[in-house]
Amino acid sequence: MSEQKLPEGTSFVRFLWCDNANVIRGKAVHVTQLEHYRQHGVGISAAQQAVPATVDAPAPGAGFGPVGEVRLVADWSTLMALPYAAGHARVLGDMVRDGKPWPLCPREFLRRMAAEAARLGLEVQAAFENEFYLLQPTEGGGFEPADRTLFAATLAMDLNRYIIDDMAEALLAQGVPVEQYYPESGPGQQEITVRHSEVRAAADRQIVFRETVRAVARRHGLIASFLPKIFPDDAGSGCHIHLSLWRDGKNLLPDAAAPHGLSATARGFLGGLLHHLPALMAVTTPSPNSYHRIRPHCWSGAFRCWGLDNREAALRIPTDPDGPGPTHLEIKTVDATANPYLALGAVLAAGLDGIRRELDPGDPVQVDPGDLSEAERQAKAIDPLPQDLGQALDHFRQDDVLQTALGSDLARAFTAVRQAEREALLGKELAAEVKLLLERY
């Protein structure tokens, strides 16, 4: 939709951005004043990229204070009426400073990484696979699951049909192609999947998805939360990335003549992901709460390994019933506290490094790595992944490839934000984390 064609009946246009803490923020412009903001966007403090999810103030060490302004310039191709907010439309913005893309802009970072892939002749397709909880508010500010059913139970489909239908219709109305729905294993937990697309569109869709699911849930009197771990004894919520590599309309992953049906390009990309995974997790599982979910025997990917249809492996290669080999890979160590632009951009940086260096991922692991002894894991080069955010941030600080990809300013601000969150939540019980973060994600 062009900038000249506002949806009929629009009164406000929301200019949205997603910060380093993965909080979706926005400023709304009334249509009577929109002309003034069409070209140069709205002003926001540069320090917005230094604000953690735990407190509305810049994180120490991020390099930002009260001085500094950037413009949030609308990408008018993303303009869309909001089916859950009559009279409001939404447009996603790019951060611009002095008339140029700002290096700390997450969308710009993903754009740069997609361009790096293009220089290798690659187009990357991706999709986020979201799990979330539907919760019923209770007296005194508490909450309880909207239902207490089992995984994929048709009873859960019937109980939640109206709200899921409304979510699907709202997503489709915004151009987000819904693919599958089923109840997940936690009480009140749901999963709605969408079709893959080019990586920046996939990240944009993730913003739209989160906004839509939460808003529609509120209209039904419920809370929708993407927080990775809400209930200590029930399933956590991931946001797995599914990804494929293409050239000239051809999927490059399958190769019937290669080991396990994976091409050399696919193996290199997989090798890069495995090599950088401990550092990558600082970007893809970047909240202290993330590490309550990533545990052995929880299908969350607690060990650095890959496997064919192995849901305990951090990197899973699903088999394709029709093709000569696998058509995409799944990264399980991802959740919805991750900024989707930073997560996808960092994944590309890691995978492309593997292609360039022809990193070998080794053999697939076809057992639950948590059932192996430590000696057996060492023999197979299977390492436990970071068990808390502090460990992941240590790896991230030492990873030259990811540091260079993000650039020094973005890497510093991102690290400061997540370090501030870690320090704010250090020593707190899960219930305290949940109370603070439940509706921020």
Image: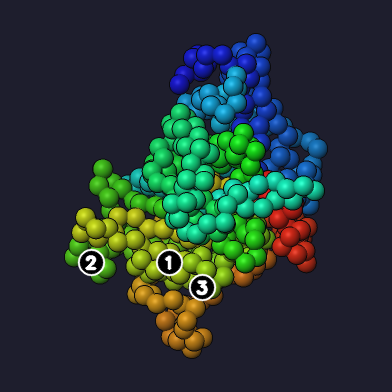
Question: In the figure, residue 269 lies in which quadrant?
Answer: bottom left
Dot 2 or dot 1, earlier in sequence: 2
Q: Is residue 9 above or below residue 391?
A: above
Q: Answer few, some or many: residues within 10 Å of disc 2's Cα (few below 14, many 20 plus, some between 14 and 19).
A: few
Q: Is residue 432 above or below residue 310?
A: above
Residue 324 position in % (x across, y down)? 20, 59
Work out how far the residue at label 3 is from the one at label 1, CA to CA, in angstroms.
Answer: 9 Å
**Residue under numbered circle 2:** 258
Work out how far the residue at label 2 is from the one at label 1, CA to CA, in angstroms.
Answer: 23 Å
Question: In the figure, residue 263 lies in which quadrant?
Answer: bottom left
> Mark 3 and 2 residues: CB-CB less than 8 Å, in contact?
no
Please give the name of the residue rendered at 63% of the width and 42% of the height, measured from the top-left corner: 222
* Labels 2, 1: front one: 1
Q: Is residue 17 above or below residue 411?
A: above
Let me know if residue 306 appears in the view.
Answer: yes
**Residue under numbered circle 3:** 297
Q: Nearer the viewer, residue 197 or 176?
A: 176
Q: Secondary structure at mark 1?
A: loop
Please give the name of the residue rendered at 47% of the width and 51% of the height, measured from the top-left corner: 155
Q: Answer few, some or many: residues within 10 Å of disc 1's Cα (few below 14, many 20 plus, some between 14 and 19).
A: many
Residue 433 position in % (x across, y down)? 73, 57
Residue 84 position in % (x across, y down)? 57, 29
Let me know if residue 97 appears in the view.
Answer: no
- Colouring used for the render: rainbow
Left or right, residue 323 beside residue 160: left
Task: Give amino acid for label 3.
Answer: His
Q: Give the numbered dot on residue 311.
A: 1
Dot 3 or dot 1, earlier in sequence: 3
Q: Secondary structure at mark 3?
A: loop
Task: Give amino acid for label 1.
Answer: Arg
Q: Nearer the viewer, residue 135 or 125?
A: 135
